[in-house]
Amino acid sequence: MAYKANFDLFSFENKVRYRFTDGFDQKQYQIAVGSIARELRQILLPGQNAPVQDEVFPEWLESVRNYLGVYDLSRFEKIKAFKSAIDTMTREDKRTDSMHFALPIHYRLHMPVEPNSDILRDKLDRSVFDGKTFMEAFGSPVFEIDPDVYDEPPPMAAPMSHPGYLTAMQVRERLEQDADDSIWLNPHNHYTLPLQQRKIEKGRLTSFVESKGMFRVLPVIAPSGAGKTRLVSEWMRDYSPKTNPESIWEAGFLSTDQDDQARNPVPWQTWKIKKNTLIVIDYTYAFDAVLKAVANSAINRASGREFKVRLIVIDHVMPKVLQEDFFWHQVASSKRIADQFQTGYLAPELTLKASGNKSEMLCKIIETSALVGTSNREDISHQVQDAVAH
């Protein structure tokens, strides 16, 4: 994956600085960024709040610097001389003139670093741009993900496959060669048909993954064609290193469509958990042994207990192997472990329901696919609805 910068650091500085000539207090901005810097520091180096004394360039700031593109690296390097201002800025009891640090940090926050960095970014934006985010204030995001570039993700410790995400270019090329190519139905093609009306379900998935507990299981249930795999595939883009190289998760699929060995439980029996891990089993038929091996390794792990393991199982109904409660009778090695996980290992199933208004969904798909960015969207939407109705 690659980022496209709509605004380089110099342009971004000009966008922010215009507020200082419009009555905005520069000191207010520095204090706001200083508060955000403390929170960012907690994300990058948890528990290390004290001002850095030894490094020429603070280690936690180096973590931020590494994500900047080459076009801004030399500009960012110049703030090395302001080490004392950088350190002071993160202290609650004192602020200093640290604009040389504040602007690059603000700029960097517009590239995802952790799942909650968007909260910090928006919080800072709204303190500067009259309650608006940068995009709301200026109409364009600072960075966009280039849909035609996916970097090769690192190998995973968990024996599963990275999601088979297709780039926009791959989809275009296939459809240009054959307009009837079934690639438009591929659940990992997120460009031909937009996903509609699944905000609640995406929220459920996020809450499940981010919830407390070392190991949890969530069944995603719906009839064929309801969009189960598509929903999970698109939702987990932020967690997959293939589409988000900064992800702190390993995220992948177990599906016989991707891997002939997907139903082999042996690799899971020696699996070493080295990161937060999100596993998706796409239809559970004949995966009974794998389910047991995954659960056994996740629960009885000798190391890596600080990491979360989340298992999503996709099927038409609640998988029989889960209904029979295999976990307690065949996996848990002791009553203590069983009691510890009994209330949390299985989340309430997520059941997908079809839209009650198919015409409305079709309208949104046509409108979004063909007319994104048009100024007369509302008028055209009415035209599409009329066409579908007749």
Image (cartoon, rainbow, N blue to C red):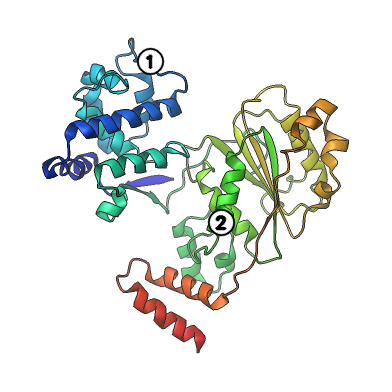
- Judged from this view, the residue extending furthest toward the left is 21
294 or 94: which is nearer to us? 94
- Judged from this view, the residue extending furthest toward the top is 54
267 or 285: which is nearer to us? 285
Count neighbours of disc 2 (C-alpha within 10 A) and say few if under 14, some if 14 to 19, many if 20 or more.
few
Residue beneath label 2, please?
Answer: 200
Residue beneath label 1, please?
Answer: 50
321 or 171: which is nearer to us? 321
Q: Pick the quarter of the image with the N terminus.
A: top left
Count neighbours of disc 1 (C-alpha within 10 A) and say few if under 14, some if 14 to 19, many if 20 or more.
few
Q: Does the rendering let one see residue 65?
A: no
- Judged from this view, the residue extending furthest toward the right is 329
Residue 50: percent from left, percent from top:
38, 15
Residue 330: percent from left, percent from top:
87, 36
Q: Is 88 positioned to the left or the right of 293 in the image? A: left
Q: Are marks 1 and 2 in contact (CB under 8 Å)?
A: no
Q: Does the rendering let one see residue 387?
A: yes
Q: CA distance from mark 1 to mark 2?
A: 40 Å
Amino acid type assigned to the residue bearing label 2 in the image: Ile
Residue 67: percent from left, percent from top:
37, 34
Amino acid type assigned to the residue bearing label 1 in the image: Ala
